[in-house]
Amino acid sequence: MANMTLVKTPMPEQDPQIRARNFKEVALGYTAEMAIEEANRCLGCKNPKCVEGCPVNVRIPEFIKKVQEGDFKAAYEIITSTNALPALSGRVCPQESQCECKCVRGIKGEPVAIGRLERFVADWYRENVNAMPEKTPSNGKKVAVVGSGPAGMTAASDLAKKGYEVTMFEALHTAGGVLVYGIPEFRLPKAIVANEVKKLEAQGVEVMTNMVIGRVLTIDELFEMGYKAVFVGSGAGLPMFMNIPGESLVGVMSANEYLTRTNLMKAYDENYDTPIIKSKAVAVVGGGNVAMDAARCAMRLGAEHVYVVYRRGEAEMPARAEEKHHAKEEGIEFKTLCNPVEIVGDENGRVCGMKCIRMELGEPDASGRRRPIEVPGSEFILDVDTVIMSLGTSPNPLIRSTTPGLETNRKGCLIVNEEEMTTRDGVFAGGDAVTGAATVILAMGAGKKGAAAIDAYLNK
C-alpha cells in the first residue's frame, strides 16, 4: 500500500551531545521495517525523473520496488548494475541536489529518501551476504588506474568487469583516496571503504599502495611496462591558502592536512601516536563540506570552541544542508559574513587569534552569488589557537610536470575531450583531477565514463 506521508521516514541518529565527542557514525541507518515504510512512499513513476538526476544512472524505481517487496538482495543487484559503490554514495552523495530534487513527491512534501534507501540496501547486503564478485576472464589487455578514490575505484571496477587486467596505483599507504583521508569516520566508516577495496581485488584488480606516479613511476614508464591505456583519477589534493599575514605561524594548517592526520593517520585513536595540535579554540575558514568535516573533527578532538568563518551568508554556503545542520547541533558556531585579514601570533610564533572584518553582500559576481564587500571599521579579533584553511584544492602538478604532452587549464586541471581522453593519446582522466574539487558521485560518474571510453579506444 502506498505511503502518502509528506515527510521522509526519520533516520535514527546519535544524540548530538554524545556524538560531538566520539567518532562513531552519526546516522545509524534504517531498519528493514523503516526501509520498507520509506520505499512505499515511491510512486513508481513511468517516466522517473530521479534517474535523470543521478550521475551514475542508478535504476532507482526498480531497486525501490524490490525494497517494497522485502527483496533486498535483488535491490542490491539492481543498484550495482550501474553503481559500484552504493554504501559510499548512499552516505556522502548530495542526493538533495541530484536524484531527490527530481522526485515528484518533493512537489508537495519531502522527496523519497533515495540516499537512505541506497545506504540501507548496501549495508544489508554487506551484513547478510557480502559475496565477493567473480573475476571476469582476462582479455589480455593491461590498463593502469592512477588514484584509488571514487573515480579510480569506479573505473577499475568497470574495466575489470570487461576483462581488463587492471592495476590501481595509490600514492598513500591505504587505498581509498579522499574516502579514507578526507571524509571522517563519523560520516563514512573506513571498514566500509576497505570492504569495497576487497571487492575490487576479488575482481582481479591489483592494488599497489605507496606508488606516487610521476615520482616512483612515470606515465611513460607505465606504457613501457605494457599498459595499453592509463586512467588518471588522482584527485585534487593541493590546498589553497589566503596569503594573508600570519599564515606561516604554528597552528595554521590546511583542512587536507588536518583531516589526513585525523582520519588516515587515526589521530582520534589513543592507540596511535599521531602528531596533531590539541586545540582549545579553532577557526575553520570556508563554507563547504570539507570545512564542516574539519570543524566537526576539531570538536571531537577536544576543542572547547569551534568556529566556521565564512565571508558570505549561511544561505550561500556550498556545504550540504544536512552537514550544516549536524554541525550546529554539535555546538559549532557559524561566523558568517566575516573574512580573516590577519592571523595573530604570540611571542613564540604560535597562533593566538585571528583578525577578521565583517562583510556585507553586494551585487552578484561571475558565479551568480552576491559578492562579499568589506564593512569599513568593523574589524575584530577572534580568540583562537588553531586556524584551519578550507578554501578549496587543486590537482597536484606532479603528473602534469612529468608527462610530456599532457595539458591543463589555468587551474591546473587536466583537459579532456568528450571521451575523457587527455591531450596525450591513451591517457584518460576524470574526477577532481579534471573538474577540481567536486563530489564523490560526480567522480564516480567520471570513472564510469572513463572506463567506457578506454574500452572503446582499445577496441576500435
Image: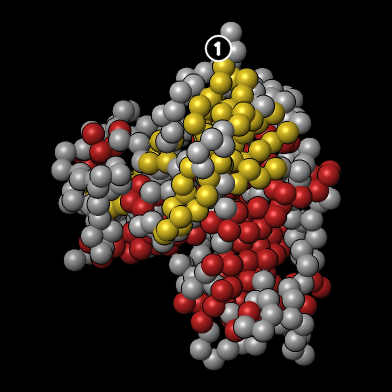
Task: Give above or below for 308 relative to 228.
Answer: above
Question: Can you give x and y, in whole percent of width and height, for residue 7 in the image?
Answer: 74, 76
Task: Give above or below for 161 relative to 437.
Answer: below
Q: Residues within 10 Å of mark 1 (few under 14, many from 20)?
A: few
Q: Which residue is painted at 47% across and 77% down in the image? A: 52
Task: Give above or below for 50 relative to 383.
Answer: below
Closer-to-camera residue (171/197): 171
* Horizontal arrangement in the rendering, residue 436 relative to residue 34 (left or right): left
* Horizontal arrangement in the rendering, residue 330 relative to residue 440 (left or right): right
* Horizontal arrangement in the rendering, residue 138 relative to residue 347 (left or right): left
Question: Can you give x and y, in whole percent of width and height, for residue 156 in the image?
Answer: 41, 53
Question: Can you give x and y, in whole percent of width and height, for residue 56 in the image?
Answer: 46, 67
| On-image quarter of the N terminus | bottom right
- Residue beneath disc 1: 349
Q: Which residue is painted at 58% across and 8% down in the image? A: 347
Q: Is residue 45 visible?
A: yes
Question: In terms of image quadrants, where is residue 139?
Answer: bottom left
Closer-to-camera residue (386/128): 386
- Disc 1 residue type (three-letter): Gly
